[in-house]
Image (cartoon, helix red, strand yellow):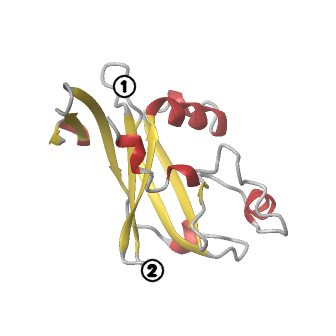
């Protein structure tokens, strides 16, 4: 496999084994986070927070996958959310209706203490309490479209 960096943090990943297969990835790095502003208002234990500001992929240039990268200071490592563009758009439109018309997007992901990851962009105090407070059978958000846990460090998305 090889990769080259294109414009706008796009990467072309090529696998030459058994023929030429190509994949385009957009890398989006987390910005510095203000834990008081972007963190829990209800006392939920958060391991780390990712804050992302980026332009929505244009119709002219679309990646196959999007990779969100954020720093996990408590584990001293980078965390990656690796998701196909189609799945990301489906979830994004469902969770943030009307936002696709905006050119600049802001998203916030919380990685909880046990490793679950949720889209908490613009989450209200009440929604946080309802969806993210851990009850006897887990969280209400588990398995919903705000749950990005299955995409966390899922390098199989890069298989060519």
User: Residue 45 placed where, x, y %?
Assistant: 64, 76
Q: Secondary structure beneath disc 2?
A: loop
Residue pointed to by mark 2? 74
Residue drawn at the location 32% of the way across and 40% of the way down = 26
- Residue extending farthest to the bottom is 74
Q: Earlier in the sequence, mark 1 or mark 2?
A: 1
Q: Quadrant of residue 145?
A: top right
Residue 62 visible to an observer of this rendering = yes
145 w.r.t. 80: above or below: above
Residue pointed to by mark 1? 58
Q: Secondary structure beneath disc 1?
A: loop
User: Residue 60 placed where, x, y %?
Assistant: 31, 19
- Residue extending farthest to the front is 18
Task: Pick the residue in front: 83 or 17.
Answer: 17
127 w.r.t. 75: above or below: above
Residue drawn at the location 17% of the way across and 41% of the way down = 3
Taking the image as shown, residue 95 lies to the left or right of residue 84, namely right
């Amino acid at each position: 496999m090889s990769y080259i960096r294109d414009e706008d943090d796009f990467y072309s990943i090529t696998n030459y084994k058994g023929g030429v297969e190509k994949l385009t990835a957009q890398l989006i790095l987390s910005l510095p986070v203000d834990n008081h502003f972007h963190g829990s208002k209800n006392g939920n234990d958060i391991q780390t927070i990712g804050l992302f500001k980026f332009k929505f992929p244009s119709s002219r240039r679309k990646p196959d996958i999007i990779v969100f990268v954020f720093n996990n200071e408590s584990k001293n490592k980078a965390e990656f959310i690796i998701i196909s563009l189609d799945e990301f758009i489906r979830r994004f439109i469902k969770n943030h209706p009307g936002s696709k018309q905006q050119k600049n997007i802001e998203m916030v992901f919380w990685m909880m203490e046990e490793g679950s990851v949720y889209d908490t962009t613009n989450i209200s105090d009440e929604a946080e309490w309802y969806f993210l407070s851990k009850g006897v059978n887990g969280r209400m958000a588990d398995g919903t479209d705000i749950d990005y846990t299955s995409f966390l460090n899922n390098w199989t998305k890069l298989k060519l």
